């Protein structure tokens, strides 16, 4: 197609009625030529999956005029038109299996009416099965199936007790694809998550997952070359380095990529904001981070076996895999160890770092609706580091931990975990854009957290209150500062202890070297 994935009114404001396009149509030719009947693509939300589905639909329906000047114009058999069944869960809110069944039946009935076919059955999977059969016999052509956001009904209910019933309904519906293979030309499914085949696609053994195949890594998203050529007229007086730091960095074993939504919103408003993040962070993801007591500093140095990233089951969700699939972590590099391939992951860019940490702070912040209070707190934390005044951190964080409602502690034991307090410190510093090195290794041990600025090094030891060596003494006895003496910067040693009974800082000490 000739447009990028964004609301039409917003696109018009950006390009003033002109057409812009990033040509991804060669991927369509490659997919068809590869002769795999069933494909699956996982990408984060608002990453161009729906646009690619649009393009597939127009190609198979033979709308050649839309591909003028694109690769597919002269590399496609336009003499054949195929019937296309398209299902999009992207804009559907479903809370029960019954509601899902009803939505699916209505989609099938509407599809049938578009092809002047009558359907009268009891269940959604029957409508699906017989719609495929009747389309095949009516058009004398095999049917193309395009399913966008296949997993949204599951993700919307991931932490709800009814998710298993929704899974069964989806699994039964998708099982039709296996039995209908002789009547199908091409099947393409997109989604955010890669649930295990036994969970969703129990009968679809020949589903080809292209999510992390290098040849298809750039199938969605905008490369640096795309940005600087397609959008050249709209980048005048724009700092490309800053745009890259804010919005580039997603990677699926290919080029670094920009989220298309971010690019278009930035070109429209010319302001650096977390546009993608502001469109809605999935609540299930934040619930899982809280439930699993996720140690936020781990986001900076995460390694995971590739098999863990591939897929997960509803009753055994790997949060790191989910963070990767939803776009909050992305591919950095890989290495082989024994029989397994391991991925190093990274936070893609400033937008994700700022948005995710700010959201998590708000999740705990009792005065979240008090804009002035939050602004004062953020300013105090920022200036304490930027102006080399670490002593001001004590009052700022005392205030923050005191603001967390008691209800947060009633049904969990996070107050007993050093990781909870460390995660909150990390979140504040990360949301301010500071360079953070969590679990900073030295030849004498491991620093809990190091922050580097142009003028100073801040070395933190964070621990629960004990009767043994206190936090500052531990930094000094292990000589953690020696790692940074050659940088000729001011070094601050900061020891902080937490009391699980008062649920706050009990000891704050610092020393300037």
Image (tube, rainbow, N blue to C red):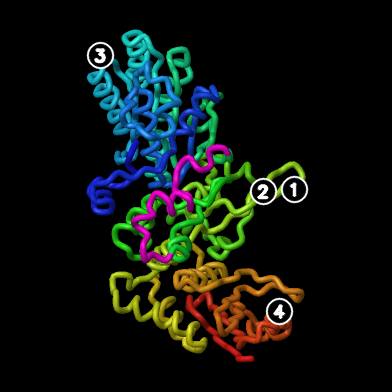
Label pair 1/2, CB-CB below 8 angstroms: yes
State the residue position of label 2: 342
Q: Position of residue 469 (x, y in %)?
A: 68, 83
Q: Earlier in the sequence, mark 1 or mark 4?
A: 1
What residue appears at the point 57 percent right and 51 percent down from the top-left corner?
Answer: 331
What residue appears at the point 54 percent right and 29 percent down from the top-left corner?
Answer: 208
State the residue position of label 1: 337
| Disc 2 secondary structure class | strand
Label pair 1/4, CB-CB below 8 angstroms: no
What residue appears at the point 58 percent right and 81 percent down from the top-left corner?
Answer: 458
| Disc 1 secondary structure class | strand
Could you say which quadrant of the image residue 452 lies in?
bottom right
State the residue position of label 3: 117
Q: Earlier in the sequence, mark 4 or mark 3?
A: 3
Could you say which quadrant of the image residue 445 lies in?
bottom right
Distance, label 1 to label 4, CA atoms, is 29 Å
Is 236 included in the stretch rendered in magenta?
A: yes
State the residue position of label 4: 483
- The local crowd at label 1, few if under 14, some if 14 to 19, many if 20 or more residues have their Cα within 10 Å, is few
Distance, label 1 to label 2, CA atoms, is 7 Å
Does 317 sit left or right of 141 as displayed? right
Distance, label 2 to label 3, CA atoms, is 50 Å
Q: Earlier in the sequence, mark 2 or mark 3?
A: 3
Q: Position of residue 23 (x, y in %)?
A: 42, 39
Residues shaded magenta: 215-239
Q: Earlier in the sequence, mark 3 or mark 1?
A: 3
Q: Position of residue 147 (x, y in %)?
A: 39, 31
């Amino acid at each position: 197609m000739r447009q990028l994935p964004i609301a039409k009114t917003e696109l018009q404001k950006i390009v003033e009625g002109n057409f812009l396009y990033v040509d991804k149509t060669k991927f369509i030719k490659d997919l068809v030529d590869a002769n795999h009947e069933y494909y699956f693509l996982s990408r984060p939300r608002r990453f161009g999956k729906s646009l690619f589905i649009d393009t597939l639909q127009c190609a198979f329906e033979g709308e050649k005029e839309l591909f003028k000047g694109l690769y597919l114009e002269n590399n496609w058999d336009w003499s054949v038109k195929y019937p296309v069944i398209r299902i999009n869960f992207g804009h559907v809110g479903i809370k029960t299996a019954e509601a899902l069944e009803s939505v699916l039946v209505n989609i099938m009935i509407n599809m049938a009416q578009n092809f002047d076919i009558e359907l009268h059955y009891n269940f959604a999977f029957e409508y699906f099965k017989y719609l495929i059969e009747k389309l095949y016999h009516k058009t004398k052509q095999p049917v193309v199936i395009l399913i966008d956001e296949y997993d949204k009904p599951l993700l919307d209910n991931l932490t709800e007790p009814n998710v298993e019933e929704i899974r069964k309904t989806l699994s039964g519906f998708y099982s039709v694809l296996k039995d209908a293979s002789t009547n199908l030309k091409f099947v393409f499914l997109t989604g955010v998550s890669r649930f295990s085949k036994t969970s969703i696609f129990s009968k679809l053994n020949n589903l080809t997952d292209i999510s992390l195949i290098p040849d298809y890594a750039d199938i969605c998203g905008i490369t640096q070359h795309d940005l600087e050529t397609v959008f050249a007229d709209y980048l005048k007086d724009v700092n490309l380095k800053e745009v890259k730091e804010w919005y580039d960095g997603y990677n699926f074993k290919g080029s670094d990529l920009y989220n298309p939504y971010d690019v278009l919103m930035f070109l429209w408003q010319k302001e650096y904001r977390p546009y993608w993040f502001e469109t809605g962070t999935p609540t299930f993801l934040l619930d899982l981070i809280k439930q699993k007591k996720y140690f936020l500093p781990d986001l900076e140095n995460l390694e995971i076996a590739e098999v863990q990233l591939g897929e997960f089951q509803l009753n055994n969700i790997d949060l790191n895999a989910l963070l990767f699939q939803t776009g909050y972590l992305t591919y950095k590099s890989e290495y082989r160890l024994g029989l397994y391939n391991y991925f190093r992951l990274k936070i893609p860019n400033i937008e994700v770092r700022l948005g995710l940490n700010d959201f998590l702070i708000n999740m705990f912040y009792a005065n979240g609706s008090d804009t002035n209070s939050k602004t004062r707190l953020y300013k105090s934390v920022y200036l304490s580091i930027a102006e080399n005044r670490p002593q001001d951190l004590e009052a700022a964080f005392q205030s923050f931990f005191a603001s967390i409602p008691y209800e947060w502690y009633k049904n969990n034991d996070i107050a007993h975990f050093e990781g909870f307090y460390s995660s909150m410190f990390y979140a504040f510093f990360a949301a301010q854009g500071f360079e953070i090195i969590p679990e900073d290794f030295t030849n004498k041990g491991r620093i809990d957290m190091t922050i580097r600025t142009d003028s100073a090094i801040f070395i933190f030891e964070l621990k629960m209150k004990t009767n043994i060596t206190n936090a500052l003494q531990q930094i000094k006895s292990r000589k953690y500062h020696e790692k940074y003496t050659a940088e000729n910067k001011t070094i601050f040693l900061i020891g902080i202890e937490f009391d699980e009974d008062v649920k706050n800082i009990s000891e704050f000490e610092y020393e300037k070297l």
